[in-house]
Amino acid sequence: MEFYGTEITSRLLLGTAQYPSPAVLAEAAKSSGTEIITVSLRRETADGSGTAFWQELQKTGCRILPNTAGCHSVQEAVTTARMARELFDTPWIKLEVIGHSDTLQPDVFGLVEAARILSSEGFQVFPYTTDDLVVGEKLLEAGCEVLMPWGAPIGSGQGLRNPDALRAMRGHFPGVPLIVDAGIGRPSDAAQAMELGMDAVLLNTAVAKAGDPAGMARAMALAVEAGRAGFAADPMERRDMAVPSTPVLGMAEFA
Amino acid sequence: MKIIVNAKPHEVSASDLQSALRELGFACSSVATALNGTFVARGQRAEVQLAEGDQLEVLAPMQGG
């Protein structure tokens, strides 16, 4: 699997927020087998806590996918992306333009506009979007080569609210890497996303807020792998009625 | 002169952004800067002159999802 020409093996991307400690984060990242971790930018404090965190992150050896989390306008998101590119020395940006503070739903109009600006400046944009097909098309036109539809609202852990829409996305964008970003709560949610043909899953809270983050990170990795293998193996069609799996022919008569 | 750094007022004697960052204690930090909403690249900081009331954002890597 490739994101913007970069070969990636692990189909699980992991967020770095809300862990009980940096050590737990490092352990979770390791047991997840992830190659890509997401980070943000926030105001630096006088004690240089951001700098210390950055040194910890570099030890993981993972690729960094900086985000524009919390940005509500195109201008905020674009400026944050430019700052992230310098700070993390990467053209990758997880582009979030948030429309509502309560639902954290993407503002897809601002998203497309920001994606166009950033793509023209050489950024490789990973847009956090809805499962809307037309928005997906507009993002591709804007220069995106990856789409990241939500499964459910950020941090909700509800799983996939609309699996049919994700299936439609898979059918509509056959060659585009699709990453389900947000809403995954349990390993079965991650497996379901992968069974639908998603290329990868990005999650954070489900691991960070689990009782045993490293254990959940491993469970998620296994689920992603199982779901992907299931998709590749072409699952059977569902049937409305029972169909005996044991042959009926040759049954003894006892009456 | 008084400038706003990460939403808090600060008194700085430096006139350019590079020197002001050093004065504010961000000398050896991994930070990115924006002045009045516009990104200022590391290489441009020495040339950017500050003015009274400027709003400076100094951002660093942080946990994120």
Image (tube, coloured by chain):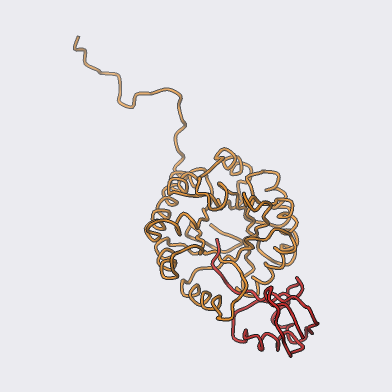
The hue of chain B in the figure is red
Which residue is rendered at x = 70% and y = 89% of the image? B19
Residue A46: x, y in percent?
Answer: 59, 81
The relative height of residue B54 versus residue B27 in the rendered view (above or below) is above
Asked whether A208 or A202 is in front, the reply is A208
Asked whether A193 or B21 is in front, the reply is B21
Left or right of residue B52, residue A87 in this image: left
Left or right of residue A93, residue A238 in this image: left
The hue of chain A in the figure is orange
Q: Residue furthest left?
A: A254
Q: Residue furthest top?
A: A255
Residue A137: x, y in percent?
Answer: 70, 48
Residue B44: x, y in percent?
Answer: 74, 82
- Quarter holding the C terminus of chain A is top left
Displayed quadrant of residue A74: bottom right
The relative height of residue B34 versus residue A154 in the rendered view (above or below) is below
